[in-house]
Image (spheres, rainbow, N blue to C red):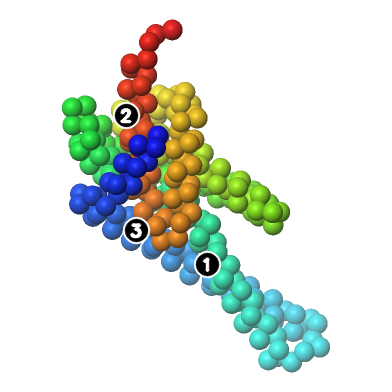
Amino acid sequence: MFTAVSNALAELFLPPLRRVLVKSVALALVLIVIFGIGLQHVLSALAEDGAHWAEQTIGYASHSAWSALAFVLSVLGGLGVITGAVFLMPAVTAFVGSFFVDDVADVIERRDYPHDPPGKVLPLPVALGEGLKFAALTIVVYLCALPFVLFAGAGLVIMLFANAYLLGREYFELAAMRFHTPHEAKRIRKRNAVAVFVAGLAIAVFVSVPVLNLATPIFAMTLMVHMHKRLGRARAVSPPR
């Protein structure tokens, strides 16, 4: 597994992957900016409406005081947007990665496994469906873990393990589905659950590093292409029981 991780890191900036990396980073940034702008507008509107309601209902303070409170709440909301964007990066990369899985896998398979049969390109609806499903599941898990962040960092540990499971599962199945049906890919992943989870931990650590995490789809898919190949070969040479 350590060899697969080191190979994935070394191949992250291969010339054939640089173009994919630029497109992946650009799409991730666009999605984050859209999310941030939209949420900021919503929070600012809620702060202004809340201050206006409080001024009309409660009174006690001048209009300028309530306006200042609305401004402070808007600023705090902006900080919350930034924090939320950081925490939602795994969900963003899960969705972004679905656009580029075949581009990355083709490069790694041709370069490192030239004698193996090439994988089949995943239909775009299938890849996007997987990306959306895992992105939604990641958000749900994050919302469940968020209350525990206040308790001695327990939420951060939960999020790390959740990312390891979710991202490891997604990218391994995407790599496996180039050679197997979705049902068979899930079966292979379950059969190698421990190895996939440990590889997922490497992805979870990678996605937690600011700026570097924008390259998560490239690193994760490269790593899981190696993992799928190695696990398949290990099973092929293992003696029958």
- Front residue of 162/195: it is 195
Where residue 20 appears, as percent x and y from the top left, is 26, 52
Mark 1 surroundings within 10 Å by alpha-carbon count, few (fewer than 14), some (14 through 19), many (20 or more): some
**Looking at the image, residue 44 lies above or below residue 197:** below
> Which quadrant of the figure has residue 71?
bottom right
Where residue 145 appears, as percent x and y from the top left, is 64, 49
**Looking at the image, residue 241 lies above or below residue 42:** above
Q: CA distance from mark 3 to mark 1?
A: 17 Å
Residue at figure coordinates x 64%, y 50% from the top left: 155
Asked which secondary structure carries label 1, the reply is helix
Residue at figure coordinates x 20%, y 49% from the top left: 16
Q: How many marks?
A: 3
Read off the residue under disc 2: 229
In the rendered structure, which amino acid carries the disc numbered 2? Lys
**Looking at the image, residue 117 lies above or below residue 18:** above
Asked which secondary structure carries label 2, the reply is helix
In the rendered structure, which amino acid carries the disc numbered 3? Val
Residue 159 is at least partly visible in this image: yes
In the rendered structure, which amino acid carries the disc numbered 1? Ile
- Mark closest to the chain's N terminus, 2 or 1: 1
